[in-house]
Image (cartoon, helix red, strand yellow):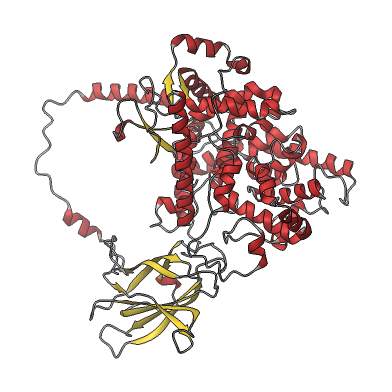
């Protein structure tokens, strides 16, 4: 690879992405408007405009936008690298993902055919009115869901991961006991304990941790008071990078919603509210087959959960809008998955009439709504809840149900979990294997949901603080190891 | 295989099949050494100055590049020299990181000036026994081009076409009218820009429904 010193491709990419944004037009307008101000001198125009934008807080907003783009940016790659390689560098992983997608689509197609339900249809006017009227209480009058079933469940996905093999890997040579104990047989590079300690140094118990009172050198009350004060300063400063760094040791309950929104640069500007309203209009106009999968999923999961059943209506609203959001398609540039394609009625095979289905390219599976449920504790405004969830999904959650070699991907997390458990609780690992209860089979469903529905909400939000703080799902594997320990020892 | 498959700028060259070094005498006795040599030959009598070498890795952990080159265009016999020694292509030889990545090695990374090169030898190493095969694919050589000299002002002037007569403005609208309508359009775009949103809703005009049974991967 070239030295890595040349940042120009990254900068160009970020500039290009920001150029068409609402922020760009706002900055332009501010710059034009400030020209009439007395402190702007012609001889030092550039510097004066910059100083004005800095003083009025616009520079900070731009910094936050750039910081967000850095998180969802394509990896720095060789110029001739094909797009598919950017999505996933390993050919056998791409092949496995494509094969899995075919299975999912086959399942969805057969459900559509068997039940005689079209993939999408325009709602009659009466139905549109009904849905508009009951938008805030959709849980009271959902359709008959008895014939619908989830397209797949985490255990189906696990079987695919277990069967994953590198055709160039010489397993006959691999005589280490380690490889035969675990279910995941893919040679990904994962961190060992010393490396994890170094990477997650802020999680050292000698540092104060929110939600953990013992082992800290500072008295818990004193630590919390100081820590909350710092948190308030971070929120006032409106700095995404500072908010992310702060989240590593946990967010105070009263500040969490602001800190997460700041970290994700989810601003909830008027245009975000408008975007949400447009998506809502899309839901009201069209009925999709995936809507029934969403209804079914909420009924099977959140509605039966002691913490989340009260948010049923919020979940329907957010999930249905999410399925219509074509802005989500952007993340397929760096997601190993590919959005499914369909054709408008009567135009089969004509590429001009090809549409992605569902419009956001994501087919929900059993437990999908649990990605949204914990966020309902933080945001009571649907548009805000929606924009935070969407950012969480395109940054993190998509990795939990697609096959990739990413260090935050589900394959690496499973391998990380098995290695950690083997190294630190070998007797437990061996015992579980002996009785035919492979640890990964027990723990997999916890991880696919990022522990949502398995940890109590206060604990879960503390875990998600760390996901945001470290911009990585790797902490989930460590959490699983600890969770197994509490369950079985 | 040929280097210039789908890159107009790359040099026409021949990449010979990899030769794996074996340890031991008899065939049955031989063991893999984890070293493999790939020779890249240029057309006879056509030495080149290399700008960069690009390739796709396939489980090679380290690469060493040796060049057969002359001191100057037609000076003395060509000698082998090492341009790059043990460049790491994989994060860890035993795991996947970097195993199928694309790489480019620029002339500025090399220990010697890659000029007047007649042939290349790539020495590939893979110390891990975890992999059945290792190689480099899609090897391409790009020639070094001297930057074009900056033109003097006089050169630019000599290229200008002198317009003999003024353009015919017959039939064009009144500039005043055009100016005012452009101002109106500009004002409209300003209003639009102020209310602009990045929201993209995609296509929902599905004329009743999508066809079922036609969900497929793009």
Left or right side of A187 for A457: right
Instruction: Work out whether A272 lies above or below A186.
Output: above
Residue furthest toward the front?
A435
Instruction: Out of A236 and A463, give the one closest to the viewer.
Output: A463
Whether residue A18 can be seen here: no
Residue at x 31%, y 31% (from the top left corner): A348
Instruction: Out of A161 and A287, give the one closest to the viewer.
Output: A161
Q: Quadrant of residue A352?
A: top left
**Where in the figure is residue A39, as x and y percent of width and height?**
55, 35
**Where in the figure is residue B154, as x and y percent of width and height?**
21, 59
**Where in the figure is residue A261, as x and y percent of width and height?**
64, 35
Q: Quadrant of residue A373?
A: top right
Instruction: Out of A202 and A125, give the one closest to the viewer.
Output: A125
Residue furthest toward the right?
A219
Left or right side of A336 for A220: right
Whether residue A328 can be seen here: yes
Residue at x 63%, y 63% (from the top left corner): A179
**Where in the figure is residue A115, as x and y percent of width and height?**
47, 24
Instruction: Work out whether A64 lies above or below A116.
Output: below
Instruction: Out of A128 and A306, give the one closest to the viewer.
Output: A306
Instruction: Work out whether A488 lies above or below A301.
Output: below
Left or right side of A229 for A182: left
Left or right side of A213 for A32: left
Q: How many marks?
A: 0
């Amino acid at each position: 690879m070239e030295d890595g010193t040349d940042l120009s491709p990254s900068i160009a990419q970020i500039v290009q992405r920001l150029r068409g944004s609402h922020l760009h037009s706002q900055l332009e307008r501010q710059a034009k408007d400030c020209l009439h101000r007395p402190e702007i001198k012609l001889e030092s125009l550039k510097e004066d405009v910059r100083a004005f934008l800095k003083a009025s807080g616009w520079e900070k907003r731009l910094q936050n936008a750039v910081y967000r783009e850095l998180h969802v940016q394509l990896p720095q790659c060789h110029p001739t690298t094909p797009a598919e390689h950017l999505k996933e560098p390993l050919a056998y992983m791409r092949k496995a993902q494509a094969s899995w997608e075919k299975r999912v689509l086959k399942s969805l197609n057969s459900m559509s055919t068997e039940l005689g339900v079209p993939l999408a249809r325009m709602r009659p006017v009466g139905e549109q009115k009904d849905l508009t009227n009951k938008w805030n209480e959709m849980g009271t009058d959902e359709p008959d869901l008895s014939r619908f079933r989830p397209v797949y469940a985490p255990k189906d996905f696990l079987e695919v991961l277990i069967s994953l093999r590198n055709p160039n890997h010489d397993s006959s040579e691999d005589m280490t006991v380690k490889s035969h104990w675990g279910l995941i047989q893919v040679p990904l590079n994962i961190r060992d304990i010393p490396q994890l300690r170094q990477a997650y140094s802020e999680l050292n118990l000698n540092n104060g941790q929110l939600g953990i009172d013992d082992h800290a050198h500072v008295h818990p009350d004193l630590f919390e008071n100081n820590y909350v004060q710092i948190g308030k300063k971070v929120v006032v400063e409106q700095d995404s990078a500072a908010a992310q760094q702060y989240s590593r040791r946990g967010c105070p309950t009263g500040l969490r919603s602001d800190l997460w929104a700041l970290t994700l640069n989810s601003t909830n500007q008027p245009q975000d509210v408008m975007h949400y309203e447009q998506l809502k209009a899309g839901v009201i106009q069209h009925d999709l087959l995936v809507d029934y999968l969403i209804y079914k999923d909420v009924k099977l999961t959140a509605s039966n959960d002691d913490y989340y059943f009260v948010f049923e209506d919020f979940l329907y609203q957010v999930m249905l809008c999410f399925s219509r959001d074509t802005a989500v398609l952007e993340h397929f540039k760096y997601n190993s998955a590919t959005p499914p394609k369909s054709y408008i009625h009567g135009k089969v095979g004509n590429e001009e009439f090809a549409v992605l289905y569902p419009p956001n390219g994501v087919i929900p599976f059993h437990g999908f709504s649990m990605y949204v449920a914990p966020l309902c504790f933080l945001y009571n405004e649907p548009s805000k809840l929606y924009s935070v969830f969407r950012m969480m999904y395109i940054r993190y959650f998509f990795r939990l149900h697609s096959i990739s070699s990413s260090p935050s991907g589900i394959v690496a997390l499973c391998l990380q979990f098995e290695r950690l458990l083997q190294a630190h609780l070998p007797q437990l690992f061996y015992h579980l294997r002996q009785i035919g209860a492979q640890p990964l089979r027990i723990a997999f469903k916890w991880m696919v949901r990022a522990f949502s529905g398995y940890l109590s909400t206060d604990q879960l939000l503390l875990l998600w603080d760390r996901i945001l703080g470290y911009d990585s799902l790797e902490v989930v594997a460590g959490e699983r190891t600890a969770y197994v320990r509490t369950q079985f020892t | 295989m040929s280097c210039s498959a789908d890159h107009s700028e790359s040099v026409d060259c021949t990449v010979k099949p990899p030769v794996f070094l074996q340890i031991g005498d008899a065939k049955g006795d031989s063991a893999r050494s984890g070293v493999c040599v790939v020779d890249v030959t240029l057309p006879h009598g056509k030495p080149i100055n290399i700008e960069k070498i690009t390739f796709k890795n396939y489980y090679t952990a380290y690469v060493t590049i040796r060049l057969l080159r002359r001191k100057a265009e037609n000076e003395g016999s060509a000698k082998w020299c090492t341009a790059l020694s043990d460049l790491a292509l994989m994060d860890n030889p035993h795991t996947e990181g970097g195993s199928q990545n694309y790489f480019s090695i620029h002339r500025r990374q090399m220990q010697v000036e890659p000029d007047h090169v007649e042939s290349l030898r790539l020495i590939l190493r893979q110390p891990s026994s975890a992999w059945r095969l290792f190689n480099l694919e899609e090897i391409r050589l790009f020639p070094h081009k001297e930057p074009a000299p900056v033109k003097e002002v006089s050169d630019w002037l000599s290229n200008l076409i002198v317009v003999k007569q003024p353009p015919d403005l017959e039939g064009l609208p009144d500039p005043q009218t055009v100016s005012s309508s452009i101002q109106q359009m500009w004002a409209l775009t300003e209003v639009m820009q102020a209310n602009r949103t990045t929201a993209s809703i995609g296509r929902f005009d599905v004329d009743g429904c999508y066809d079922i049974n036609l969900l497929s991967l793009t």
